[in-house]
Amino acid sequence: MRALPPHRSHDLIGLFEASAQPIVGSDGQRLCGIPAWELDRRYPDFSKSPLDDWLTTAGYAGVIEADFDDEPVQVEIEEDDDPAWVRFREPNTLRWQRIPFTDTEVRQIAEQRFLNAVADLLDIPLAQRDGIASPAIPGVLWALGTARLGDGLHRQVWLVRKLDRYLPEVATWLSSRSSSGLLLSTGQWHSDLIRLPEGIVLCPLCDAVVSHLEETRLDTDWLYRRMLGVSENMDDSNFPIEFDPYRKRLVIRGKAPWVLKGPKHVKAVEYMFKQARKGRWELPAKEILAAVRDNGQVGGSVRMSSLFGANIEWEDYITRVRKGIYAFKLD
């Protein structure tokens, strides 16, 4: 996959997504894959494409798509006297039409080859790829392994297809087994359209492919920013604060970075940062302190000063606006 130009990798990703679509086979059983007529329509020169080598034969279709009053319909395929041919009734004229048997071939992207190719792009070690051979949800969800997305940021990566069809199953599986990670989708599904467990970041795989190179590379910096929750539609150049929860670092424009020490400090600053993103700059202390507590925890810090303890460095970055109300100190 790495050797393919980016536009061909986009095609390959789309074919992997389409490989899960169902179709009736010649024996009446359900097949999954892409029928030959669909490949011909999408890619007129497909037999000369480097992607042809990625496809395997899943079987042969028992139906074919034809136009009826300018609408696509599926009509049944029947055997012909010549085994090299099959026939179907043209829905508008009801006349028999013959096509080569090979035109009914249903093909699909070889799963493990594709998944290992994506794992290669993320430099995931072979020893961590057990989830490729043992899918979390067969044909739908796979654990690719742990990838390094940024300096010090290593996260579990999954790949999903047909998320629109299997969202409840995928969300249930992820929520029961992981608290955070990156979910790559072979479909164009974005996090603002799909509700997933907190801590799971959804990214379309095509969006991560660097478009201006001759070979396929994934933009791990972009994936890293997505893991941080940075919106691509937000003008971050005008936002006076940067916060990286993985490096535990807060940067306020014009000040030296503040590297946080304890996990509760990180939780407090991360909560304030997320609220500032929403335009809520001034927050009650009790709200910040509540965000720090673990679920079900009773007690804990009751003052901001007790949360940060004897280290008064925090006062350079967080200020009391008025009684019980705190905000980032921007000046």
Image (cartoon, rainbow, N blue to C red):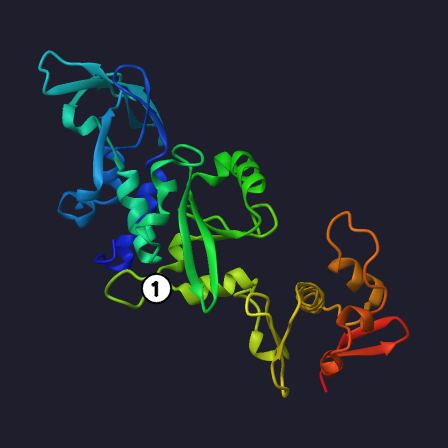
Q: In x, y percent, where is residue 193?
A: 56, 48
Residue at 57%, 73% in the rendered image:
235
Which amino acid type is marked by label 1? Val
Quadrant of the snapshot with the C terminus: bottom right
Where 261 falls versus 6 (above or below)? below
* Number of numbered discs visible in the structure rendering: 1
Q: Is residue 291 left or right of residue 118?
A: right
**Of residues 175 and 79, the one drawn nearer to the viewer in this rendering:** 175
Front residue of this view, candidates 173 and 165: 173
Residue at image location 75% in from the left, 68% down from the top: 280
Does residue 266 lie above or below 31 as drawn? below
Q: Quadrant of residue 136?
A: top left
Residue in the picture at 56% in, 46% down: 194
State left or right for residue 186 relative to residue 194.
Answer: left
Along the horizontal axis of the image, is 44 left or right of 204?
left
- Mark 1 Cα-neighbour bin, 10 Å: few <14, some 14–19, many ≥20: some
Q: Which quadrant of the structure image shows residue 3?
A: bottom left
Q: Residue visible at 39% across and 41% down?
A: 131
Of the pair 181 and 54, the residue shown nearer to us = 181
Compared to residue 194, the image places residue 134 above or below, namely above
Q: Residue 251 appears at what percent x and percent y?
A: 61, 79
Q: Which residue of the protein is positioned furthest toward the front in this rendering?
A: 310
Residue 263 is situated, as x and y percent measured from the top left of the image, at: 66, 63
Using the rendered view, name the quadrant where residue 60 is placed: top left
Residue that numbered label 1 is attached to: 210
Residue 122 position in % (x across, y down):
35, 57
Residue farthest toward the right in the current orientation of the protein: 323
Query: In screen coordinates, is 13 left or right of 231?
Result: left
Task: Check disc 1 and report its element: helix, strand or loop.
Answer: loop
